[in-house]
Image (tube, rainbow, N blue to C red):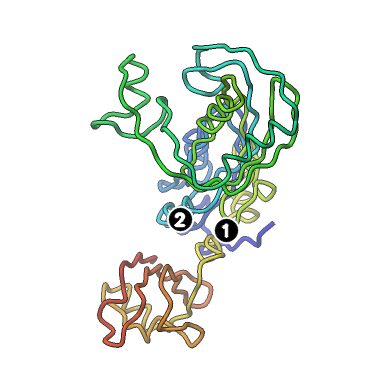
Amino acid sequence: MMQAIVKGLRSPCGDSCDGIILIDKNEGETSFDIVKRLRKSLGLKKVGHAGTLDPFATGLLITLLGQGTKLSSYLMAGEKRYLASIRLGVETDTLDPTGCVVRTKPVPSLKAEEIEENILNFVGEIEQVVPAFSAVNIKGKRAYKLAREGIEVELPKKVVMIRSVEIISIEMPVITIEVVCSGGTYIRRLAADIGNRLGSVAHLSSLRRLSSGPFHVKDAINSERISTAGSDSIMKNNLISLRDSLPDMKESQVDIETVEKIRNGRRPRWDEVADEDFFCDVYEGFIKLVNGALLVAIIEVNRPSGDDTDWLRSIRVFN
């Protein structure tokens, strides 16, 4: 398991417990159920998560503690890996096992090679219609609320990236696949679209999130332990520090004078935040600013120019 770093631990936890904890969510729980139990167990007010898992789904849920809630957008941007089972022949209104059956259709006799060839057509950049039962806003109202009221609307489309699809098993009428995809991909919609392409209909019958960005479910604590393990045990063995929560982000060490300048709301100079490892004339993107092992800020950088005036797009400060 990734080395956990605990900073300023107080009993039961206090406001100094900043970072993330990886949870392996069980079936039947909501993501918010996990958040509520962590708040109670750790005595923290600020607890969130990076990427909802539906109640029927299991697997990796990244929970955010204290200032870790500021990391949500960075963590959610990472690629996801899922184990998904697709049930052919039956379509539900939610496109998953929690919905009502709205259509059935015979499943054609298909060879494994035909199934694989058709599924691999989804690899790459594809367009998805957002599911009717989703949290997307349509004219100021959540899509799932409109769907429950029986109001039909034109659902928006979005472009997502399917990095890879591997067929794990074919036990007709169920096909199990492993998918690597961009954040924001609807696996329910992918399952329904695969069913249509195979000449039938389908819904997502089970889903397990295996990884999100650099984090894997094998390093997560089972959600049952939140209730049974003591808060000290959870924190000491599972808390990942703010700095280590973004292991793939480029980082730069800054001195204490620059730390104080940033925390006092003043704009740093490029030469104060970029060490000698940076190629100042080509770099752009996000950088972690750290002092020792502590995360000070995340900055978003334009390609630096000679006049040192327009290189900083945004800055998020951690106390």
* Circle 2 residues within 10 Å: few <14, some 14–19, many ≥20: many
* Circle 1 residues within 10 Å: few <14, some 14–19, many ≥20: many
Point out residue 316 in the picture as x, y percentages from the top left corner: 35, 64
Task: Return the mark for residue 104.
Answer: none
Q: Residue at x 62, y 47 (%)?
A: 164
From this view, report whether residue 164 is shown above or below residue 96: below
Q: Amino acid at mark 2?
A: Gly
Pick the quarter of the image with the N terminus. bottom right
Visible residue check, residue 62:
no
Q: Secondary structure at mark 1?
A: loop
Q: Quadrant of residue 81?
A: top right
Point out residue 78 in the picture as x, y percentages from the top left corner: 51, 53
What distance separates the C-alpha of mark 1 from that of mark 2? 10 Å
Which of pointers 1 and 2 lies earlier in the amino acid sequence? 2
Which residue is denoted by mark 2 in the rendering? 68
Task: Return the mark for residue 240.
Answer: 1
